[in-house]
Image (cartoon, rainbow, N blue to C red):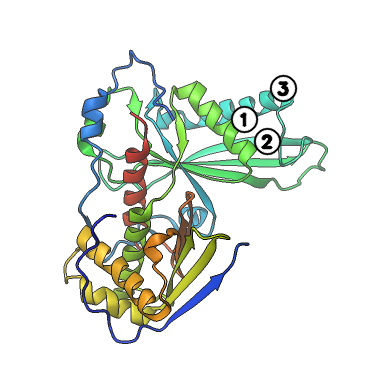
Amino acid sequence: MAKRPQRRDVPGDLHSTPNISKPRGYFSGNLETGLPSSRKYASLRKPPSSREINKANNLSKKIDPEQISLLIGKDWHLHYVTPLYKFSHSEIRTYSRQLSAFIAAEKQKGVPFDMGSDNIFRVNFSIILGIAEKEEDSEAVFIQIYAKQFFAIQGTTENVIWSGWLACVNCSTEYISSLPPRFTYFPLFCSNGPETMTAIVRTWFQKTFDCSFGNLTMNYSNLGWLAAIWTDCKQTVDFKYLKLSWTLPLRPPLDITYTINSEDVWELWNSVHKENDQITSEEMGQFMYSLESHFFRHFKVHLTFGELIEVSTSLGLVQKNGRIKFLSGERMPAILTLLTENAVLMMPI
């Protein structure tokens, strides 16, 4: 078992509310396109030992409110994406037409659609300015798919039945600069909508840009970082709780939900976090260890024997299986940086 961080004193009496209940690939690019070698690529995929936490790190203050509303409040399924060959931001209108035509062709082939076979579909690509943090980052691309019935009366409003976006936030400058000029790097892809449509969109991207997708899951470290980042938001915005969910490998499996109110979790965070603009991996580890130790003292259950599957606050929630929901723009750039790093790390070499 990995060595745990040295324990620090946990503040007085954390008012936690336990809720214990019983059960209820491959890097596909053209081998001649000049991508970095596997050895060089691996050397650029080391996770950071600390993260900067700009106090004014609120995406809502950088992006048009109409555009930020497209990202907040939706349940996003996370994916990683290998570099796109010959992608151009100036061609997004062409991509809108091409993907619309591809969906129509798949429908003609008899591919099953969860949203009904009598619909006609229209695709719109757009650019969201402001998500990219560095000059080397590619500006985010947002995709919406609209549907309406074929025999709908004139003037009937189209409905958005699928949304997705591609992003690159604070990606390794060294790796991006090592890509040939015709490659655009969007490590992170988020989708919201029927899985059948997600599969069709991914297939179109793979055929058009010689790239590969994979599902992006979150490990214990990723979830711990997000718990620390959201807790640190307490100094700029109020949130009401931190909730952590575990599943323990018992027969039947045991699910545990552990909720700590914001004042208590903030006191704990201040006991391990130094007053600076960074969160270190040591601080994150001690924060999570202190929470788990407190739970054991009160309920005699070792959470470390289980699996952390969800972290949530009033600012957002994330699940181990690769689902995330942003409920606020607060610290969203830092979170997207973490997701970008995780996407790069999960890509097969």
Residue corresponding to mark 3: 109
Q: Position of residue 151 (x, y in %)?
A: 83, 37
The amino acid beneath tag 1 is Ser
Residue corresponding to mark 2: 121
Residue corresponding to mark 1: 100
Per the image, label 2 sits on a secondary structure element best described as strand
The image quarter containing residue 266 is: bottom left
Would residue 306 appear left or right of 207 to someone viewing this image? left
Q: Residue sitting at 44 percent across and 43 percent down?
A: 216
The span from disc 3 to disc 1 (Cα, nearest Å) is 15 Å
Disc 3 vs disc 1: Cβ atoms closer than 8 Å? Answer: no
**Neighbourhood count class around disc 2 (C-alpha, 10 Å): few under 14, some 14–19, many 20 upward:** many
Say if 50 sits above or below 134 in the image.
below
The span from disc 3 to disc 2 (Cα, nearest Å) is 15 Å
Disc 1 vs disc 2: Cβ atoms closer than 8 Å? Answer: yes
The amino acid beneath tag 3 is Lys
Mark 3 or 1, nearer chain start: 1
Extreme residue in the front direction? 251
